[in-house]
Amino acid sequence: MRRIGLLSDTHGFIHERIFTFFDQVDEIWHAGDFGNIETADRLAEFKPLRGVYGNIDGQDVRVVHPMHQRFKCEEVDVWMTHIGGYPGRYERYVTPEIYRKPPNLFISGHSHILKVIFDHKLNCLHMNPGAAGYKGFHKVCTAMRFVIVGKDIRDLEVWEFPRHEAVPRE
């Protein structure tokens, strides 16, 4: 059994409440747009971290975190990338591989919109954790946690926090 904390689009900011939400997870997965390497390092100091770089991330992040990660967690084939699209509308650079060899779990960020969608055509669960940082058009900061046991992905919980309460005061 692995307990996973999933977030994306922190854009250089991590609210302290996320550490409480992720307190019992075994590892954290970040689906891109860390914002800076310090944000990635802060998460990695708290729990083991897997991440991919996003479109706003500089070389400091890109040297450490790849564009794509494809790995096994328990018996689940996971593919994580930042800009991946959604079932039926995958990004062009994802499309050939996802149809050739679909993962069991496809994770992307970028949209700032939390979504969990099952792709019946590919027999694949898609997750986008939304945006955990305060920069962007979203009104609510979000993240997820879930459990993987063997081939099962279950016990999904969502963390929500009003974005306006997350903005640092000068």
Image: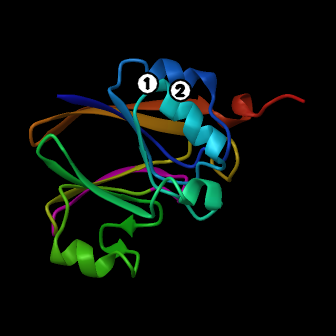
Residue nearer the viewer, 113 or 19: 19
According to the picture, the residue beneath numbered tag 1 turns out to be 22
Residue beneath the point at 29% across and 33% down: 146
Depicted 46 relative to depicted 138: above or below: above
Q: How is the image coloured?
A: rainbow
Q: Is residue 57 visible?
A: no
x, y (%) of residue 95? 31, 78
Is label 2 in contact with label 1 (beta carbons under 8 Å)?
yes
Question: Which amino acid is tagged 1?
Answer: Phe
Residue beneath the point at 63% across and 48% down: 138
Q: Secondary structure at mark 1?
A: loop
The picture quadrant where one finds residue 3 is top left
Residue beneath the point at 15% across and 40% down: 74
Magenta span of residues = 109-121
According to the picture, the residue beneath numbered tag 2 turns out to be 18
Verify whether residue 114 appears in magenta.
yes
User: Is the residue marked by circle 1 packed among few (<14), some (14-19), or many (20+) residues within 10 Å?
Assistant: many
User: Is the residue marked by circle 2 packed among few (<14), some (14-19), or many (20+) residues within 10 Å?
Assistant: some
Label 2 to label 1, Cα distance in Å?
6 Å
Q: Is residue 93 visible?
A: yes
Question: Which amino acid is tagged 2?
Answer: Ile
Q: Secondary structure at mark 2?
A: helix
Q: Is residue 130 left or right of residue 95?
A: right
